[in-house]
């Protein structure tokens, strides 16, 4: 143990800092691979060939007066095995060093409780890491979502799920997600009001623009009719009977950002005629234009009536011999 030069620090058989030991072990691995071929070739032959080869080996050794053949062969086998083990250990250590991010003692001393994330755990499994990444992805999607709805997909085949996804506009995100993960992503936001409605196996539709709201509702209606979802769920409810612990509906519900009103299935279907912002602006502009036209017509009529009245007054004054309107009054 200790410093061994070239900036490498060794601890027992494992090299921590340098690559000299790693290169040596890799060289031994290459040599072991070459020798392994010579070692494996005889063992790959049938039993009769192996016996013949052994007899020939003993005969040659007897003729040459040498008794070291078998001993040298055994030592070669041991060396090859040790070389392979050392090379494997070196490769494993090298891989760990590449995946490890170096952190200084100064960085460690500067850490505080605030630096630890709320989701921090001393041990995390691969499944937990995947679920965490999925929750974060749902959170990012919710940030840019205008409307979210969920519909039941029980007893839908994989082919049917793909066909249903293809009916929606390409700008809508249609995903099969677990209810618990969606609820987790909604925690602390207005979206969480939809959480209690999420039961059963569902598909979620993330509508990012108001322009896609009507097409998304229309696409759902086509999907429900194409796969006869209402009849399918009625058959499932009848088959399960009292074992079904929740009310199974084709359309679970939805919620719209900015308004944050939770809608049930019938409420979501009413949005199929929902006007977009552009359509609303056009309607308002048309209404304003109509009001302006009527107002302009009224304003144009006032001077005409006023002129007619003044003319009649002047003519009356002239008949009575009065020169001013004041005298007429």
Image (cartoon, rainbow, N blue to C red):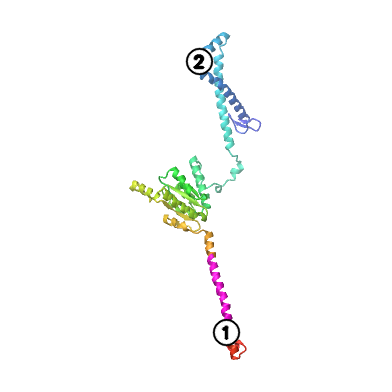
In the picture of the structure, the residue carrying the numbered disc 1 is: 312
| In this view, 11 is above or below 37 | below
Res 295 visible = yes
Residue 295 location, quadrant: bottom right
Q: Is residue 25 left or right of residue 142?
A: right
Magenta-colored stretch includes residue 310: yes
Give how far across and how far down residue 93 sits, in percent: 57, 32
Residue 33 screen position, x and y as percent: 57, 24
Q: Quadrant of residue 306?
A: bottom right
116 part of magenta stretch: no
Residue at 52% in and 66% down: 287
Label 1 sits on a secondary structure element that is: helix
Q: Where's residue 133, x and y in %?
A: 51, 45
Seen at 56% across and 72% down, the residue is 296
Task: Please state the extent of the stretch shown in magenta in the rendering.
Answer: 286-315
> Residue 104: image x %, image y %?
61, 41
Residue that numbered label 2 is attached to: 49
């Amino acid at each position: 143990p200790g410093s061994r030069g070239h900036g490498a620090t060794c601890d027992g058989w494992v090299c921590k800092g340098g690559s000299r030991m790693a290169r040596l072990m890799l060289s031994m691995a290459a040599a072991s691979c070459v020798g392994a071929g010579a070692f494996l070739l005889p063992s790959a032959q049938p039993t009769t060939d192996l016996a013949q080869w052994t007899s020939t080996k003993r005969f040659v050794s007897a003729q040459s007066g040498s008794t070291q053949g078998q001993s040298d062969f055994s030592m070669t086998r041991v060396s090859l095995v040790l070389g392979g083990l050392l090379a494997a250990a070196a490769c494993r250590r090298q891989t760990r060093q590449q995946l490890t991010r170096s952190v200084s003692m100064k960085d460690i001393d500067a850490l505080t409780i605030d630096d630890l994330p709320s989701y921090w755990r001393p041990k995390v499994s691969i499944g937990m890491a995947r679920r965490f990444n999925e929750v974060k992805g749902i959170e990012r999607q919710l940030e840019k979502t205008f409307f979210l709805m969920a519909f039941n997909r029980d007893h839908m085949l994989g082919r049917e799920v793909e066909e249903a996804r293809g009916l929606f506009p390409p700008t809508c995100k249609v995903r099969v997600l677990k209810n618990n993960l969606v609820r987790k992503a909604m925690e602390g936001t207005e979206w969480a009001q939809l959480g209690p409605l999420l039961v059963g196996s569902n598909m979620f539709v993330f509508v990012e623009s108001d322009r896609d709201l009507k097409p998304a509702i229309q696409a759902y209606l086509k999907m429900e009719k194409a796969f006869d979802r209402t009849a399918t769920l009625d058959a499932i409810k009848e088959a399960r009977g009292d074992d079904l612990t929740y009310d199974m509906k084709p359309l679970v519900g939805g919620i719209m950002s900015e308004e944050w009103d939770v809608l049930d299935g019938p409420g979501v279907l009413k949005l199929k005629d929902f006007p977009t912002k552009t359509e609303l602006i056009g309607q308002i502009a048309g209404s304003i234009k109509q009001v302006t036209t009527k107002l302009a017509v009224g304003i144009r009529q006032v001077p005409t009536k006023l002129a007619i009245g003044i003319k009649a007054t002047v003519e009356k004054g002239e008949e009575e011999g009065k020169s001013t309107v004041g005298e007429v009054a």
